[in-house]
Image (tube, helix red, strand yellow):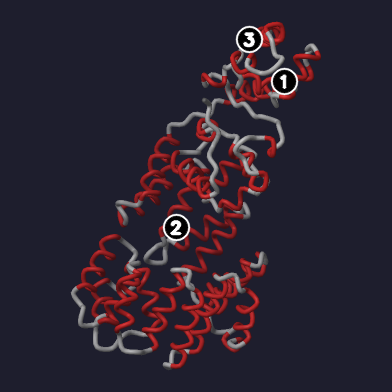
Amino acid sequence: MVTIAELQTELFGKEIPAFEKIKAYSAVVNASERNRIATSQKAEDQSSNPLGAGIALWLCGRLTEAEELLKKAKDCAQKFLSLGCLYRQQGLFDKSLEQFELAGKHRAESLTVTMEKIETLRQAGLYERAEKEFKSCSNFENVSAEYHYQMARLQEALGQYEIAAKHYRTAIELDPSHARAMFHLAYLHDLRGDEAMAIDLYEEATQIFPAYTAVLLNLAVLYEDRNEYAYALQCVHAVLKAHPNHPRASLFLKDVESSRTMVYDEEREKRKDRQNKILETPISDFELSVRSRNCLKKMNINTLGDLLRTTEAELLAYKNFGETSLLEIKKILDSKTLRLGMATEQKAAAITPTAEPEEQDGVNPELSTKPVEDLELSVRARRALGKLNVKTFYDLVIKTEAELLGCKNFGVTSLNEIKEKLTNFGLTLRKLD
């Protein structure tokens, strides 16, 4: 693998390297914060070389400055290909495609141009147009790893996972160092629950230098699930060594370290399950007067657990609800060593309302039934929600932070990720007032 010094020599030399090399350099530049800083500084010193400096800043993620420099550069295939990728990163797909067309007119390799167009069309959701582009380069099917990688990404976007996996494998056979194909094949197995195969592939991907940060973090999650904390910590420390300020890795490190000392109390979990069953008991199972039953129904209090989230003052404030009904309800709760308002004091265990989602304040009916997959969470967070049987947005927003953190191996990293994703939909986790 090329060093950062060799990269700079080529990138800022008289002859700009081929675009395939430039894209390969991206992994080197972003392999560590030190490399990225060094490349940025070198680019700033190369104002007389707008093409090399512009490409370097693009690789470092400084897109606005990179665009300004590349526009000033002399027209060539590398300039337009770089601009095309830059605009794609910004979501400007039409402008991206225009640049790739210009690259073709400036003698860029046809396969390179076609592959970049296909990736752009896929990211834009224009799958039919992407499929048509593949027909123009079918003669590369037996020789190009990138052809099969892009085909796999398209098939995965179309939901054809078996076909996608087949193309990822072909890409790896043609080019064993194709890190992106290795990562996505591992991730595909990871999502489908084939942990053993996912670990094998992630481990193989770590041997391709420089190892992807995502590979190391996903592998750490799988190691932690197997209680192989030493291996998980090795992966996280490898990330932090290259990226000392990586926020997710820093939080994940704390989660793994806390997991090492976490003890699973089976008896406590059984008691918790029994308590949950009691709290889910329907109000209709108790012998209440017609007046009390009707008032509770109108207040949307359907279970014993719902009562624990309601105070005496809230009951008495309701029209036609008097002291007689209050005493009647308190007697029932006393028989179970429970009382009104327990949940608001955060002394109740898991309390799960049973009312329909559309009846809950603060939850949009259209959002409530959306699957949690739409949040696009990390593997770690999805596994935790699976253990909690959280399948929809509604299932999630009725959970409290404490309930999520109570799940084995669920830490602050996953909690913050979920809260951030929910915020994008205008939602929050339930709070005990």
* Side of 39 relative to 211 (left or right): left
Q: According to the image, label 2 marks what residue? A: 214
Secondary structure under badge 1? helix
**Percent from the top left, x then y, of residue 12?**
24, 81
Q: What residue type is labelled 2?
A: Ala
Secondary structure under badge 2? helix
Between residue 332 and residue 326, name the one nearer to us. Answer: 326
Between residue 6 and residue 114, name the one nearer to us. Answer: 114
Q: According to the image, label 1 marks what residue? A: 296
Is the residue marked by circle 3 packed among few (<14), some (14-19), or many (20+) residues within 10 Å? few
Task: Residue 251: name its quadrant.
Answer: top left
**Percent from the top left, x then y, of residue 201?**
52, 61
* As drawn, 192 above or below 258: below
Q: Which amino acid does label 3 sit on?
A: Thr
Is the residue marked by circle 1 packed among few (<14), some (14-19), or many (20+) residues within 10 Å? some
How far separated are the C-alphas under marks 3 and 2? 49 Å
Q: According to the image, label 3 marks what residue? A: 337
Q: Which amino acid does label 1 sit on?
A: Leu
Is the residue marked by circle 2 packed among few (<14), some (14-19), or many (20+) residues within 10 Å? few
Taking the spot 71% from the left edge, 32% from the top edge, the residue there is: 355
